[in-house]
Amino acid sequence: MAPSLDDDSSLFNFVVRDGNGVKGMVDSGLSKVPKPYIQPPKERIDKQNATRHEHAPIDFSRLNGPDHDEVVKEIVAAAETLGFFQLVNHGVPIDLLETLKDAAYNFFGQPFENKAVYHKQVSPSPLVKYGTSFNPEKEKALEWKDYISMVYTNDAEALQQWPKECREAVLEYLKTSMNMVRKLLGVLMENLGAELDDSKIDALIGMKMVNMNFYPTCPNPDLTVGVGCHSDMGTLTILLQDGIGGLYVKIEEEMDNIGKKAEWVEISPISGALVINIGDALQILSNGRYKSAEHRVRTTNRKSRVSIPIFTTPKPTEKIAPLPQVVEKDGMAHYRELVFADYMKNFFGIAHDGKKSLDFAKINSASC
């Protein structure tokens, strides 16, 4: 039964609690954005005033050759400034990336009953959660997004418990990305003067989760957001975009050839590339040298969009704090030591609100 678009409670139950999602609402027929999805003016994305990030992607294959030092400089410079960069020749097969995008469209194209099986209240597996928006019970305005989230424990459980429509492709995507992730983390840690052994790297990327995000067409993208302003909580995020675009990153400090402080730049899709972004855990470990990027996603009225991020995060039991080598150089720690499970609880307990989640770890954050 289609919801009443003018009854906020009815709409919320249909989209969120019953598991129809934004796609179910769109498929029921609508010509305007319902009130619960209209963002406050300051949260809307002004596409006309945003610039495009036109920097060439980093060719990751050059890391193993005579251009090693130059590639390291490119990676470090991106991590210290925008917190986002794109990689090509990353080692993940291009045909697998295309298969992934097809799998995402196929999953979200199913009848809602097939997807709602994995609704967080009823999912047969603690590793799989289907939902919409980020924290709908606490958001002032809902996000125009549905998602399926898959936590990785081991291959056997993934192949048994993840949705059959996508599990093989998603698992292959995750596994083939890990060599790239480990190399990136090694480069970034070495630049800070810390050489981590395999067990420490494993601890920093010990929890892995893959999301498939679906952004249905929207009658008025200027009023909505696909994802609100936030930074990712983990170590590194690997993102596959489709060709439609809509990912925007906020500039923390004025940067030559990119933009001014607080401006937004669009990370334009590049065929065959993966987008890498720094997470909060890595900003904490680097004592603020590496920037977890504040980003958001715009909706579109042209065609539905998908994105597929891999979130690598420290194990929940892992204690994280600024590396002593960095604190010694900086003269003081800007973040306190904390158990990552506590950071996760805080992150998921609030609505998206820029980089406010990092305040939980800041020393003297109350006076910032």
Image (tube, rainbow, N blue to C red):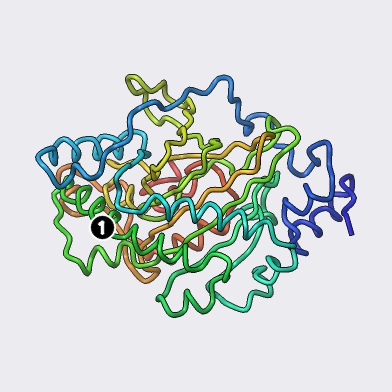
Q: Is residue 145 above or below residue 344?
A: above
Identify which amino acid the numbered label 1 is placed on: Arg
Residue 95 lies left or right of residue 220; in this view the side is left
- In this view of the protein, which residue sits in the foreground, 82 or 146? 146
Q: Position of residue 97 (x, y in %)?
A: 44, 52
Residue 331 lies left or right of residue 258; in this view the side is left
In the picture, the quarter occupied by the C terminus is top left
Q: Is residue 297 above or below residue 340?
A: above
Q: Position of residue 62 (x, y in %)?
A: 19, 41
- The image quarter containing residue 341 is bottom left
**Residue under label 1:** 182
Q: Is residue 170 above or below residue 94?
A: below
Q: Which residue is drawn at the image coordinates 46% and 25% (left, top)?
A: 52
- In this view of the protein, which residue sits in the foreground, 132 or 35? 132
Q: Which residue is drawn at the image coordinates 65% and 60% (left, top)?
A: 131
Residue 60 lies left or right of residue 144; in this view the side is left
Q: Position of residue 256 (x, y in %)?
A: 32, 20
Q: Which residue is drawn at the image coordinates 67% and 53% (left, top)?
A: 138
